[in-house]
Amino acid sequence: MLADSDTRWKWGALTARRIAAADHPGRPAETAGFLLRGRATPTARQLAEVGVGTDSVREVTGAQFLRAIRDEGYDVVVLALVGGAVQAMLHGIAALRLPRRPVLVTGYVGVVYEKLADGLLLRHGADVVLANSRHDADRFRAVYEGVGADASAVTEAALPFLGGAPYERREGRDTVVFAVQPSVPESRADRMYLLDRLAGHARLHPSREVLLKLRSRPGEHTTHLEELPYQRLAERLPGGLPPNLSLVYGHMGEVLDRTDLLVTVSSTAALEALHRRVPTAILTDLGVREALGNHHFLGSGLLTSWDRLDAGHRPEPDEEWLARQGVAADGTYEKAFDAARERVAGLLRQPELPPVAPYYTPATAPGYLPGILARHRLAADGGPLPGAAPADEPTGLHRVLRDAVRGVARGAYRHGVQRVAPVIRRMGEL
């Protein structure tokens, strides 16, 4: 499994576990984890917080990963990556011309509310493109068929991290959780508005525990860039935070264990909560807009505002909408990955797999594909660019020094994104 962020690691590792039974029925499969080196490579703390491990973990470049595929031999490869990286690895694996290539699986880590066509076509060429719901499966097939591409790889499944104990209202407990997102909303004004309303809700209900569920600590990155962390904004909130409002980190499932109302703009955490029947609210305060992702919840019955929540409103989800989103808590979730396991098992039984055939080729996208491949040091034919193949991994002092320099460089980049870039933008607006 190859992942490029903490959330994709969580999705990829759990997906690998759920489909591993198709590999060698009757005995546990070994799972090797690879972290694609980049701006969002998770820290050790983030991986520990995700709480999902593999038998081994390595941080690699794209070229090193392809070399591992060539030399070490894997039956199934889960590509838990952003779309462009998936496309690059598909072309890179095709260029290896292996006698027996692995089965290639990919998908999305959560709600697909933007870049549907772009992201899907960049994932085309995998043997299995997992859809997290019936709703997504229908949309995915429509995109592929709309450009004349083979849609047989689309396989309906579900988010692999749903689960946990069903919600039970507990006497004496009243906890509201606001689940933040790294990039939604983007502006300082909008984020300060949401933080101010959350603090206002806490002041209005002093006996209620209110939690601000954070995705990462300052300096860490997740799947999306977070230029304005709520931790920093909270330090500037007029009047400060009320005593019953706390900032929390940790595994989302553990936070949901004590949640009586989850509030968010459009976080995938809403689906986790709904699966457990935790009361859930999707905010309309900033509008219902594609840029926010809350348009995905049209028809859900969950759209509401802070004014209504302050007054005691609790949205009731639409059962038909829940079923189409793959979060209906009716016992069917345990079978959600049966089709994926069967497809992978069928591919593994084939004496020979067909060549990897992405929709994007030098013929279909000559002005787009080369740039995507070049970002991962691959030529237009999927082979390595001159000088891209890494030397053997350094050992001893060389490795210590390399890792130290890399850590400093990554920290400087993240500091620039979160501290320097916003200042420059504000100066440009003067």
Image (cartoon, rainbow, N blue to C red):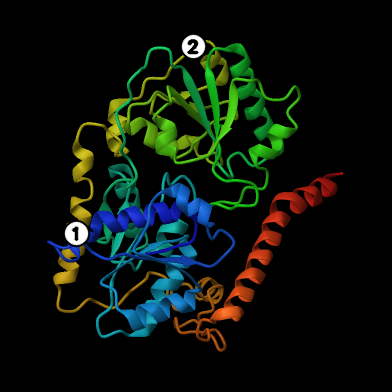
Identify the residue at image location x=70%, y=39%. Answer: 232
Q: Report which quarter residue 242 is drawn in.
A: top right
Q: Is residue 93 above or below residue 327?
A: below
Is residue 404 shown left or right of residue 31? right
Label total for image: 2
* The one of 395 and 228 positioned closer to us in this rendering: 395
* The one of 390 and 146 positioned closer to us in this rendering: 390
Identify the residue at image location x=51%, y=81%. Answer: 393
* The one of 133 and 227 positioned closer to us in this rendering: 227
Is residue 226 shown left or right of residue 73? right
Q: Could you tell me how far apart the alpha carbons at marks 1 and 2 are, in whole angstroms?
A: 46 Å
Identify the residue at image location x=53%, y=67%. Answer: 37
Tell me residue 398's x, y (percent).
60, 80
- In the image, which disc is placed on residue 21? 1
Amino acid, disc 1: Ala
Tell me residue 363's x, y (percent).
44, 78
Tell me residue 422's x, y (percent).
75, 48
Image quadrant holding the C terminus, namely top right
Q: Could you tell which of marks 1 and 2 lies nearer the N-terminus?
A: 1
Can residue 330 be seen?
A: yes
Identify the residue at image location x=35%, y=24%. Answer: 317
Element marked by disc 2: loop
Amino acid, disc 2: Gly
Which-is-in-front pick, marks 1 and 2?
Answer: 1
Q: Report which quarter residue 298 is drawn in.
A: top left
Element marked by disc 1: helix
Image quadrant holding the N terminus, namely bottom left
Other residues around mark 2 within 10 Å, as few (<14) / some (14–19) / many (≥20): few
- In the image, which disc is placed on residue 300? none
Can residue 115 be seen?
A: no
The residue where tag 2 is placed is 312
